[in-house]
């Protein structure tokens, strides 16, 4: 995979591994990689069998047309990254974690969206995958901040971000349109500073002062 984020290009395919962090940051259980058109059949089947898990928290593409439009949102990795968490041993897709709405300059921020798939949910794969995504976002993309907006009552999602040290920042009424209505959300976020990650050089769009 070639990643071009302004002033540098990183070739990862040479590592002989589809993971984002070279051999996936050496993680024993999961690989995180970009979603591709080849994932369509498996993704749609997983969405189908995960309907009960996802409702009412998230709505993922359920038809081929919806999947292709969704994939198109991640054509430009400068503005959003569509990532899959896969079980290392089998290659099966365990879930997805997207870094949406990437804003550079003084913000260097992305907004996370994620879901597990029912066959492998509750086994720690999403937690493992999120750990890799955080490293990728802060070390490779050189973002400073990742946000997760979570509906009150979504305890599994809240546990996931709490486990990784996200900080509760506040409560926004009517924040996102989900399942047919504007839903209140808790705003959770983590910064590279909180994880002690300092990239070798700042992102080129970060002002000097
Ligand atoms: C939120 C969501 C992604 C969490 O996925 P998940 O599969 O439960 O997350 P994990 O893979 O990290 O699994 C967590 C469980 O695995 C267990 N676990 C952790 N490490 C483990 C390991 N190494 N081996 C086995 N189990 C493990 C933990 O006990 C944990 O259970 P707990 O939270 O009850 O303590 C999932 O519930 C989901 O898709 N929800 C619907 C969509 C959604 O809400 N998206 C977010 C919108 S804000």
Image: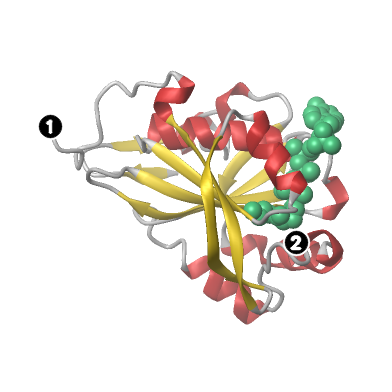
Residue name at image x 59 percent, y 57 percent: 185
- Frontmost residue, 134 versus 31: 134
Q: Is mark 2 within 8 Å of ligand 1?
A: no
Q: Is mark 1 within 8 Å of ligand 1?
A: no
Query: Which corner quadrant of the image does residue 12 belong to?
Result: top left
Disc 1 marks which residue? 208
Counting from the top left corner in percent of width and height, residue 180 is at 66, 79
- Left or right for 193, reference 105: right
- Frontmost residue, 171 versus 197: 171
- Frontmost residue, 162 versus 26: 162
Counting from the top left corner in percent of width and height, residue 158 is at 69, 43
Disc 2 marks which residue? 42
- Ligand 1: give its quadrant: top right
From this viewpoint, is residue 123 visible? no
Counting from the top left corner in percent of width and height, residue 29 is at 74, 29
- Frontmost residue, 18 versus 208: 208
Does 82 sit above or below residue 72? Answer: above
Query: Which quadrant does the N terminus fall into?
Result: top left
Query: Which corner quadrant of the image does residue 64 belong to?
Result: bottom right
Query: Which quadrant does the C terminus fall into?
Result: top left
Query: Which corner quadrant of the image does residue 128 belong to?
Result: top right
Mark 1 secondary-structure assignment: loop
Counting from the top left corner in percent of width and height, residue 144 is at 36, 35
Does 58 sit above or below residue 202? Answer: below
Residue name at image x 56 percent, y 74 percent: 68
Residue name at image x 57 percent, y 44 percent: 33
From this viewpoint, is residue 33 visible? yes
């Amino acid at each position: 995979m070639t990643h071009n984020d302004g002033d540098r290009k990183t070739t990862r395919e040479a590592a002989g591994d589809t993971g984002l962090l070279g051999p996936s940051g050496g993680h024993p259980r999961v690989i995180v990689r970009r979603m591709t058109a080849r994932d369509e059949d498996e993704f749609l089947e997983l969405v189908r069998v995960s309907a009960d898990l996802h409702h009412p928290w998230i709505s993922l593409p359920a038809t081929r047309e919806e999947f292709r439009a969704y994939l198109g949102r991640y054509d430009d990795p400068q503005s959003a990254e569509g990532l899959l968490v896969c079980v290392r041993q089998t290659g099966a897709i365990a879930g997805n974690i997207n870094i949406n709405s990437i804003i550079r300059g003084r913000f260097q921020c992305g907004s996370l969206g994620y879901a597990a798939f029912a066959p492998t949910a509750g086994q720690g794969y999403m937690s493992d995958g999120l750990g890799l995504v955080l490293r990728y976002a802060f070390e490779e993309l050189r973002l400073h901040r990742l946000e997760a907006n979570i509906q009150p009552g979504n305890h599994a999602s809240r546990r996931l971000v709490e486990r990784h040290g996200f900080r509760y920042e506040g409560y926004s009424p009517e924040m996102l349109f989900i399942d047919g209505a504007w839903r209140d959300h808790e705003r959770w976020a983590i910064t590279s500073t909180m994880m002690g990650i300092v990239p070798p050089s700042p992102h080129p769009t970060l002002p000097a002062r």
